[in-house]
Every structure is written in C-alpha cells, then in structure tokens.
Image (tube, rainbow, N blue to C red):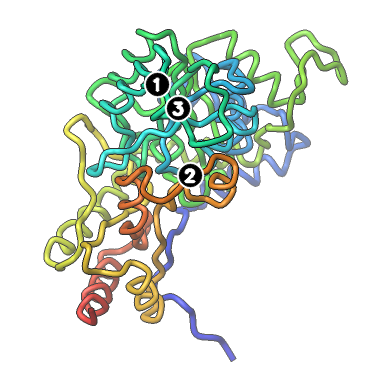
Amino acid sequence: MATKPKYLVPMSSPEITAADRQAVMQVLNTPFLSMGPFIEKFEKAICQYTGSRYAIGVSSGTTGLHLCVRAANISSGDWVITTPFSFVSSANVLLFENAIPVFVDVEESTGNIDVNQTRQAVNDLVTGGKSAQQWLPPQGVNNVSKLKALLIVDVFGQPANLNVFRAIANEHKLKLIEDACEALGAETEYAKAGTGGDYGVFAFYPNKQITTGEGGMVVTDDKDAADLMRALRNQGRAPGDTWLQHTYLGYNYRMDEMSAALGLSQLQRLDELIDKRDQVARWYNQRLTQIAGIHPPKISATTKRVSWFVYVVQLTEDLDRDQLASLLENEGIPVRPYFLPIHLQPYMRERFGYQSGMYPITEKLGNKGLALPFSSIMSEEQVDLVCSKLRKCISRF
C-alpha cells in the first residue's frame, strides 16, 4: 500500500532534463571520471558567462571560499569583516585558518551587509584604539591583529553593492572576497554577481539556480591566485609537479567529471532557469501583497537582475514564525527559517562570547524570516496552494 506524501508541494526541486542526463552518461561512457575534459569545458563556459579571466571548479561553494581565504593569505589572528546573516560556511572558512570573523549587521530591506556600518568598521579597525573594540567579538581575540579582508555575501540571490565595497577595499588595501554562492546570474548596475571582488564563488547545490549535485566554482582575474587555487584543490600539486609530487599542503577539493558535465549542460539554460524562477517570484509577489502579516522580499535600487535562490518572506511582529511553520507543515506545506544568525550558533557563542541582541537586524530577520517552497519548476497552481494554506494558517492567530 502506497503511503501518502507528507508534503503537497516540494520545498525545492532541481530541473533535470534529458540533455542533462545524456551529458552525465557521456562521461560514464569514457574512462575519464575525474580531471578530464569536462571540468575544463565547464570552467571556460563560466569564464565566458561572467567575463572572468579564470575559473576553478571545486567540490562545493564552501571549499571554493576556503581556497579564496588561502589565496588572500588570510592566516591565524587576522580580522575579516563579514556578515552574521548567512549560511555558516562564510564564517567557517575563516575559522579553518584560525582567522577572526568580524561581524557587521545587515540592511533590513535586503539582508545584505550594511555598507555604512562596514565603512565605519573598516575605519575604526584600521586606526585601532578603543573605537575598534566595539566591532570585535567579546572574547577570544588578539586586539593587536590586522584587518586583512572583506568577505561579502550576496544574500538570497540579490547582489550586495560591491561597487562601494570595492572602493572601501581599495582605499585600505584589503582583499575582497565575494560569496556569490546564492547569486549566479544576478547583476547590479555595475557588474555581474561574483565579479565584484578579487575572487568570487558560486555554488551548485540542488536548490541553486543550476546544480551539479555538489560543487562550486571560483572566478578571478588574478593569475597567481588561480594557479595557487588549482594547486591547492588538487592536494597541493603545482604546475610542473610530477605525479605524487606536491609543492604545497593542499586538499582534495576537486570537482568530478560527472558533476562538471551536468553543470555545463545546465549552464546553457541558466538564463531560462532564472527567468522561470523570476516568474514564480512574481506569482508569489502578486498574491502575498493581499495576505496580512506577510512582507514579500524587497529589491534594492542597485539591483539590475535578481537571481532568485530562495523566496523568503518576513512576518509581522504579531505572528510567531515557529508556530506558523508548524501549522503549515501540518497542512502539507514545507517551510524553513532563513537564516539562523551565525553569531548565535552554539560554537560561536562558546568561542567568542556572542549574546542575543548584539546584531539586532540580523536577529530580527532570523526570527521572522520564512522560506516558502520555491523552484524553477513550480507551477502557478502550486503557488496558489501555498498562498491559500498560508492565509488559512495566519487566520488562526
């Protein structure tokens, strides 16, 4: 006897076509399952799409960010300004090198790191003294360390104002890492997401704009950094090294050939997939404006093109997010909180002494944000169903 599906609509779904499957099968019919021709083709296609000189395929967005941290020569005790409103990997890659994430609160409208606060934090940290202390974690920090970089996250597929962050970084000779793992295909009035910093990173998890199953890609115009990252992803084997010779201490961060083939196939449809996601977002926008207690996502004036990753609404103060999520689950509608603030994760509290109330906008968004079912293959009827259930559940408050 078949069991009844738990959910009436999926939380997310990758769009896999016959051409995608054929691309993977093409690899499986060759002896080259790793370090073959498809990773090179995928990297070249990403360069062509973004306008970047170099692309480095990796096993995940996280490993890509870690390679950027290494390429930026960020090391033990160094300070890096970043956001507490993100997936934990954007801070974890700093901790891997024993560097210190220095959090700056975010804009309430977009969830992206606040430009004005970042500018002030940079000025205070560079000049030092008592003014610097307000930005540093409460404990576990060497107060004579040096600000080394900015790690900026493009939240939910909407790029941060990288033009301004680039100017800040240039003024103070800081490296700029752009975590565009949620924003492939997005654009500001100045540049495509991923190309605003010294290095940019994309991710291809199944709920992303395109997927390779697991995987990521680093883009840069810096040849030396690209060469280093290629070596580090392959156990530290540098150009000119022979088999089993390793110039650097490296990692196994390679992307396999099947993933690369799938990514290359999907990339050819990226604009189509983004347009489909945009249509789903517009369906939601039209309906949610008629439901009390819900604030749809806002688009920044500097955003030329959103590349919708997830669709996250904000709830009004009178609605309990967790209670509403439970009601929706019982109605067969999966939802998720986005994001749980990084500084309030247990290991961050323990190591750095963070407490509630330190980053109020991040915490407000984290407490009131709710991701609704979303994907490029979602139908208008499914959006209607989600919104109908949402209206029903809100009426119970």
Location of residue 27 (image quadrant): top right
Q: Residue, x 49% and y 80% (percent of image)?
A: 5
Circle 3 — which element?
Answer: strand
- The amino acid pointed to by label 3 is Leu
- Callout 2, which amino acid? Tyr
The label number, if any, that marks residue 142 in the structure image: none
Q: Indicate left or right for 335 with 66 as reference.
A: left
Q: Are marks 2 and 1 in contact (CB under 8 Å)?
A: no
Question: At 69% across and 26% down in the image, what residue appears?
Answer: 233
Q: Label 2, on which residue?
A: 354
Residue nearer the viewer, 211 or 269 = 211
- Residue 152 versus residue 317 in the image, above or below: above
Answer with mark 1 or mark 3, whichever residue precedes in sequence. 1
- Percent x, y for residue 162? 32, 23
Q: Nearer the viewer, mark 3 or mark 2?
A: 2
- For the C terminus, give its image quadrant: bottom left
Answer above or below: position of 160 versus 122.
below
| Residue 307 image offset from top left, x and y in percent | 33, 40
User: SS at mark 1?
Assistant: helix
Instruction: State the image coordinates of residue 75 (x, y, percent, origin top left).
Output: 62, 20
Q: Earlier in the sequence, mark 3 or mark 2?
A: 3
* Amino acid on which disc 1 is placed: Lys
Q: CA distance from mark 2 to mark 1?
A: 19 Å
Residue at image coords 37%, 62%: 373
State the CA–CA distance, disc 1 to disc 3: 24 Å
Image check: 297 left or right of 370?
left
Residue holding disc 1: 130
Q: Which mark is residue 151?
A: 3
Quarter residue 182 falls in: top left
* Residue 42 visible in image: no
